[in-house]
Each structure stands twice: as C-alpha cells, then as structure tokens.
Image: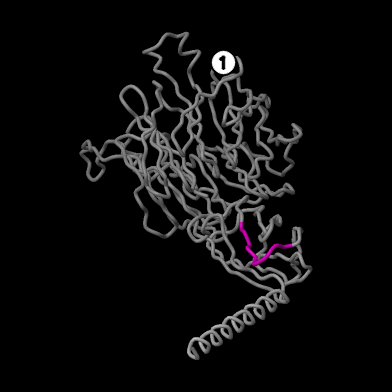
Amino acid sequence: MQTRTRFKTTFAATVIMSLLIIAVLATLLFVKGPRVRFVQFETDPAAHSLLLGSTITVHFDRPLQDNDYLDQITFSPDLEFTATTSGQKINITLQQNPQAATTYSLKIGDQIFDTTDRTMKSVETYEFTTSQPRYMYLERNYGFDFSDDTDNFTDKPDVIKLAQPGLETQNVFEAEQISMFDANSDYAVVAMVGEEFDNLVTINLQTGEKRVEDTRFSGRVDNLAIGPRSNHALFTVTPDSDRVSSAYYAATAHTLFSIDLEDGTVTPLSQQDGRAIQAYSVHMGMFGQVALVQTIEQSFYAVSVYGEYDPVVIGSYANSFGFSDKDSAILFNTPTNELVVYDVASSDLEPIQSNFSGYFSDIVSGLNARYVSSSTYADGISRYFIDRIEDDGAVNLLWSNQSQEKLLRGFSVSYDESILALHVNPGGCQFDKVLPNPECQLAKTQLYDIDQSKIIDEFTGFDLVWLP
C-alpha cells in the first residue's frame, strides 16, 4: 500500500513538474515573439536557376500580423522583390533574375509582429548560393564520318545534351534524326523526323521519364515552343503537300496545337467559328499563359495556350522578338527597321529611343536592357556585332567577330544576363538542317562571358536553350 501511495505521489510530482516546464517554455516563447522556423524555396537554387517570379517562403512559429514587411526584408547582393503575409508565413516573389553562381544573404528584420503585437527579438540571416547557368543543345549527326577524307556514311544518332559551363555534359535523348526541340527546367519536347510524319517525345527532366505522344496528326512539326515556367507547349503541323489536296493543305498548313506536358493531352487550337489557328511563328510568354503567333499576312495575334478565348489581334509588323521578361510587353520590328514596344495591358505602342543605327538581325529582351545583333558588309568583308541597349537608350558594344572566317548565325542570353551563346558558322555552312555539308563539322556554339569579355567554352552543337 505504501509503495502504491509513493508511486502515485512520485507520478503526480513528475506530471506537475512537466507541466510547469512546459508552461515556462511556452511563456518564454510567447514573450520572445515570433521566430523563423525555416526558409523554403520553390526550387532548389543550387540545382535550378531562380527566375523572376520564383517564390521564397519564410515560415514562422506563429501567425503574423498582416503586413508586407518590405522594409524588414533585404537581399545582399540586392534583388527586387514583392512580399505578402499569409498566416504563419511571408511569401517573397522575385522581380528579377538573380545572378548565377552567386551567394546571396536573405536578412529578416526584427520588426515583424505576431498577432499579440510582439516582435522578433533579433535579426535572422539565411544564405543560399545560385547554380551555374544550365543549357541544352542539339548535337546533330550529318550522316558523314569526318574522321578522314573519305566522307564515309555513319549512322550516329542526333543527341540532345544537358550542360553547365565548365562541367561535363550529359546525354538526355538521342534519335536517328531530330528536327527540333525546346525545354524548360522541368520538361523537354523533341520532334523526331519519320518517313511520313514527325513524332513528338516529352521528357520529364526531373524523373528522366520519356513519353511518346499520341498526337494523331499527319505532317511535319515546323514550330515548337515552351514557356520557361509553363507545363504546356505549342507546336504547329504542316501536311505533306504531295499527299493532300491543295484545298486541304491551304486549310490545315501550320495548324497550331497545345500539349499538356504533365499528361500528354494534345488539343488543336481553333477560333470560335471552328477554323484552325494557322501560325507561321510562335513565341511563348514566360509563364505560359499566352502566346504570340504570326499569320501568313504578317499579322500578329495573342492566343490562349488553353484555348480559352478567340485570338486577339495585335497588329501587323515585319517581325517580332517575343515577350519581355514580365510578359508585360512585346517587342516588334517595323518594315522601316524601327524597334517598337507594344504594351499588353494598354495596347499602346511606343518606339524605343536609342543611339543604335544598325539593322536589327535579332533581339533578346533582358530585364533592364535589350541585346541586339547586327551586321555590316563593306569591301567584301562581313562584320557582326552584339550590342546592349539600356533602358535609357545608351548602346554598349558587347561582342564583334574578330575573324572573317566566322559568321554569326544567331545568339541567346542566359537568364542572369552574364553569358552570350553565339552560334557561329564558317562561310560555307549557312544551314545545318537541309543537307549534310563537310564544312558544317566546323560550325560551333561559343559561350561568351560578358564581364570577362572572352569565350569560356566552345562545342559542336546548335539550337541552344537556356534552362530556368
């Protein structure tokens, strides 16, 4: 009996002590105010590029007062962002593309209040490092073995490769003949050439899973585009004119399709009257909600990727260079070589004022600048240039060809705007998709570091796509 009484007494004392400890700890935590539990990234910054629109979520141990706390959040180096509060977390949305291979510190100030009006007791800092820029490119087999002078035929496949500057490449996909591909950080879509029609394959870059799409069309894929932050792709199909009537060809050539990359659903996009949308060029927006397509009359239309509304007429222009980073504007070139910006929200058109006097060959929109390629020809010599046009109109030369043996066929810019990818061909190799040409073995893609003003890598390959 005494043993049982002693046990009850000891147990009761233990329970009371535990409750007192819990109460003391709870009081201490309550008095100290909110604390950061952990910081969560939408995607791992060490593995994938953070982009404009990427989110960083700061989780706290209790509900916070509703505020944006913009004055309590800082990045070093500086980053533009917005912030909103929801319950126990603050959601930070980046408004620019961070620099690659850079260590950032995220500082959370101490003037963040919980619902009882208590503040944090100290400033908290978190560090993260962004990855090197990643890219994919197509290494094309021209059907010849260039190892000697015999021009022997070889059955080596075309290969799509994944790479980062200075690191070993990875083979992602190979096929006998690849006509084109596009990719973002989650998916790649590949068009393979068949005898009578092309086939599409979707690759999940996170799992490595490959899926042959049930497209149920007969023809050739002649456009393919994925938004950097989209789970849909657009492509166009043109039937073989020798296999169909001229009327059928006219009604179906360049028909626009949408494909859901998650489940493979393919949807033909049409106008409200049922007629197919026929597109001769396709530009996807950053977030994959809208696309810009061009008709044979050189009229441009905004099209819903999901087929939710009829195409919206934008206007007629000589060429388009696609959307700005924020999808808020579209860049056009007029027949008189004037560069203009179309504001998506207001439909206003405004010329870009700059000191640039050359002819625009290609233009890539950055966050605060535009990158322009141009060329001149005089006395039998071709010169190629890439300039950066700042928002204030200032023009800065970034690159020009130092050798007349290299021709600039195209270029692109990494998302952090630190590297140019230059597609350069020798004079005897203008195209890489039409006929095998022994000279094309010399065609290269060069990676040019803008800050260092030098080539940092060179490889045989085309159609380079920067991955977000």
Residue 246: image quadrant is top left
Q: Secondary structure at mark 1?
A: loop
Residues in magenta, as a range: 56-64
Q: In which quarter of the view is residue 59 placed? A: bottom right
105, above or below 94, in the image: below
150 sits left or right of 196 in the view: left
**Which corner quadrant of the image does residue 85 belong to?**
bottom right
Q: x, y (%) of residue 177?
A: 32, 34
Q: Nearer the viewer, residue 35 or 301?
A: 35
Left/right placement of residue 425 relative to residue 279 reads: left
Magenta-drawn stretch contains 58: yes
Estimate how packed mark 1 is, as few (under 14), some (14 to 19) or many (20 or more) residues with alpha carbons within 10 Å.
few
Q: Is residue 17 left or right of residue 343?
A: left
Q: Nearer the viewer, residue 122 or 237?
A: 122
Q: Nearer the viewer, residue 82 or 326?
A: 82
State the residue at coordinates (79%, 68%).
117
Residue type, label 1: Gly
Residue 437: where, in percent of width, then height? 33, 35
Residue 106 position, x and y percent, is 64, 66
> What residue is disc 1 on?
274
